[in-house]
Amino acid sequence: PPPFTGVWMGDSKLCAIGVHCGNYITSHGLALNCCTDLTWFDHIVPCGLEGKGVTSLSHELGQHVAVSHVLEPFLDSFQEVFDCTLVSSEDPG
């Protein structure tokens, strides 16, 4: 829900997106909850957002969703949306 960043399912965050700038370096990333143990979030206020929850693909779909299952479709979609080509550090050359 605006103005919160990330991917949401109702009032629960499915994917966190972040940017950090410091010492002349900018880093960014995301955390897509695939099969996360959501009980750990009972002990914190996730992303500092009172009254908001956290969910996962496994929870929402009612079946185990491994990271390995979503990685390739996610990377394909990323390349399409951002019109880029991703290169793995494991790729030769």
Image: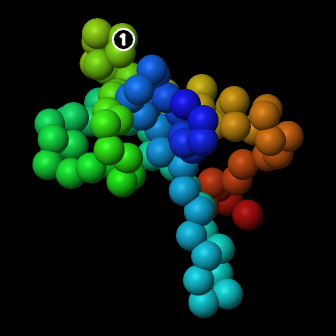
Farthest right residue in view: 83
Looking at the picture, how far across and down is residue 26, in whole percent? Answer: 65, 74
Labels in figure, total: 1
Q: Quadrant of residue 59?
A: top left
Looking at the picture, how far across and down is residue 93, in whole percent? Answer: 73, 63
Task: From the viewer's perspective, tell me whether residue 73 is left or right of residue 33.
Answer: right
**What colour-coding does the image apply?**
rainbow
Kindly identify the amino acid type of the residue bearing the numbered disc 1. Answer: Leu
Farthest bottom residue in view: 23
Rendered position, 49 above or below 19: above
Q: Quadrant of residue 18?
A: bottom right
Please say whether residue 66 is visible from this viewpoint. Answer: no
Rendered position, 33 above or below 25: above
Rendered position, 25 above or below 3: below
> As rendered, which of 88 and 19 lies closer to the eye?
19
The residue tagged 1 is 61
Task: From the viewer's perspective, tell me whether residue 85 is left or right of residue 48.
Answer: right
Q: Quadrant of residue 61?
A: top left
Task: From the viewer's perspective, tell me whether residue 36 is left or right of residue 13.
Answer: left
Residue drawn at x 21%, y 51% is 44
Residue drawn at x 85%, y 40% is 83
Question: Dot 1, how many residues are within 10 Å of its Cα: few (below 14), some (14-19), or many (20+)?
Answer: few
Residue drawn at x 36%, y 54% is 48
Task: From the viewer's perspective, tell me whether residue 60 is left or right of residue 77.
Answer: left
Q: Quadrant of the N terminus?
A: top right
Residue drawn at x 78%, y 34% is 81
Q: Secondary structure at mark 1?
A: helix
Looking at the picture, how far across and down is residue 51, in whole percent? Answer: 31, 37
Please say whether residue 44 is visible from this viewpoint. Answer: yes
